[in-house]
Amino acid sequence: MNEVNIPVQSLKTLIISMISAVILAFCILIVFIGPAEYGIDPTGLGKKLGLTVLAKPFSESVKKVMSCPSGEQAADWQDIVQITIPAKSDLEYKFYLQKDAYIRYAWNSDGDAVYFDFHGEPAGDKTGYFKSYRETTANASEGDLMAPFTGTHGWYWKNDTNKAIHVILKTKGQYKIKGLI
């Protein structure tokens, strides 16, 4: 029979490997995660790599332009928001609709075309299922949707340019605003 000898690592090798892993994790935290997630950039490399723009709070990305008073959940609303999609970034803006509720929408960007996926996700679904209604690259889109199921419905926008893109989104219908996700 063939005998297989599996080498056993010494305690010294294991300790050196563990210390190296901790040091590497700390460096990754300081250089990449800190600037991208929290805007903390002690080395300055995060800014040079463009990571600090990722830490911009979502509240700075959406500016409510106009909103009519909201009544009950099923009341017709009219909302206009300006959404800023940072350079080389993406975001989602969602609404919650009951089955057979409608939303009428129109949006346009400030000139540049942006990739988008208008889609919906059923409430309570844990599988990751979503239904795309429209997916393309454009600088404007408009239409109506009668929700085929209860859940969140909205847009995923991706900005591949080197500058921020501003989108004006106008909506009317029977929904609750979830906002940025």
Image: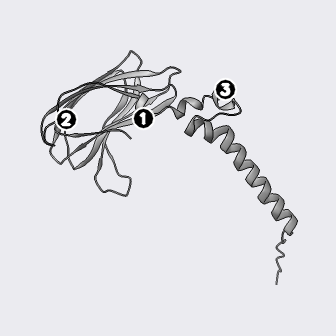
User: Tags 1 and 3 in contact by the CB under 8 Å rule?
Assistant: no
Q: Earlier in the sequence, mark 1 or mark 3?
A: 3
Q: Position of residue 162 (x, y in %)?
A: 53, 21
Give the total number of marks visible in the rendering.
Answer: 3
Q: Is residue 13 left or right of residue 173?
A: right
Dot 2: element? strand
- Residue type for callout 3: Lys
Instruction: Provide the residue designation for mark 3.
Output: 48
Q: Quadrant of the C terminus?
A: top left
Q: Earlier in the sequence, mark 2 or mark 3?
A: 3
Instruction: Report the mark closest to the observer, 2 or 3.
Output: 3
Instruction: Provide the residue designation for mark 2.
Output: 103
At a point 22% along the width and 50% down the height, the residue shown is 150
Dot 3: element? helix
Q: Position of residue 76 (x, y in %)?
A: 13, 34
- Residue type for callout 2: Ile
Cα distance between the residues tagged 2 and 1: 20 Å
Q: Is residue 22 left or right of residue 168?
A: right
Q: Position of residue 156 (x, y in %)?
A: 38, 36
Disc 1: CA contacts within 10 A as few (<14), some (14-19) or many (>=20): some
Disc 3: CA contacts within 10 A as few (<14), some (14-19) or many (>=20): few
Instruction: Provide the residue designation for mark 1.
Output: 91
At a point 77% along the width and 59% down the height, the residue shown is 18
Cα distance between the residues tagged 2 and 3: 42 Å
